[in-house]
Amino acid sequence: MLWGFLLSTFYKTFLTSMLVLPRVVEPFNTLDELVTKRPIPYMLSPGTLLSAIAKEAEPNSTFGKLYRNVGSWGNDYINASEKIVSGQYAYVGIKSAMYGVMDTVFAK
């Protein structure tokens, strides 16, 4: 009977912990909103396909504005990830490149 009580208690605690979601505040919803309103400076990695597309885009397009208004070029991954985690910069790039930073943010 004791084992049944302990098992049900741990199971209930586990289910409750799965319901807790981290609160994430998004200062922008679209790339166009980030580029035009500039609520936060953003970082772009040099040498990526996205930076090449932005470099070749028309100046008045969203990607053209993205390239012209870059706050920082993320050459050093450790330094760039610290700035992103602290909220100083947003990162514009593919999601898989930022799994380490996302893990650090959600671990807090």
Image: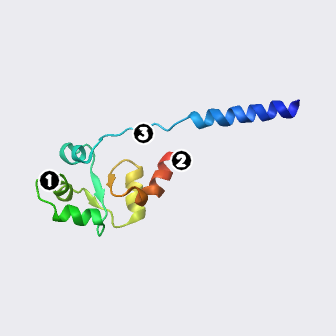
Mark 2–mark 1 distance (CA, rounded to whole Å): 37 Å
Residue linked to disc 2:
107
Q: Residue at x 87, y 31 (%)?
A: 2
Residue linked to disc 3:
24
Label 3 with label 2: CB-CB less than 8 Å: no
Q: Amino acid at mark 1?
A: Ser
Mark 3–mark 2 distance (CA, rounded to whole Å): 12 Å
- Report the front residue among 18 and 39: 18
The image quarter in which residue 97 lies: bottom left
Mark 1–mark 3 distance (CA, rounded to whole Å): 29 Å
Q: Earlier in the sequence, mark 2 or mark 1?
A: 1
Dot 3, crowdedness within 10 Å: few (<14), some or many (≥20)?
A: few
The N terminus: image quadrant:
top right
Report the number of discs: 3
- Report the front residue among 86 and 23: 23
Residue linked to disc 1:
61
Q: Amino acid at mark 3?
A: Val
Q: Residue at x 21, y 61 (%)?
A: 54
Q: Residue at x 24, y 56 (%)?
A: 71
Label 3 SS: loop
Q: Earlier in the sequence, mark 1 or mark 3?
A: 3
Residue 72 image offset from top left, x and y in percent: 27, 59
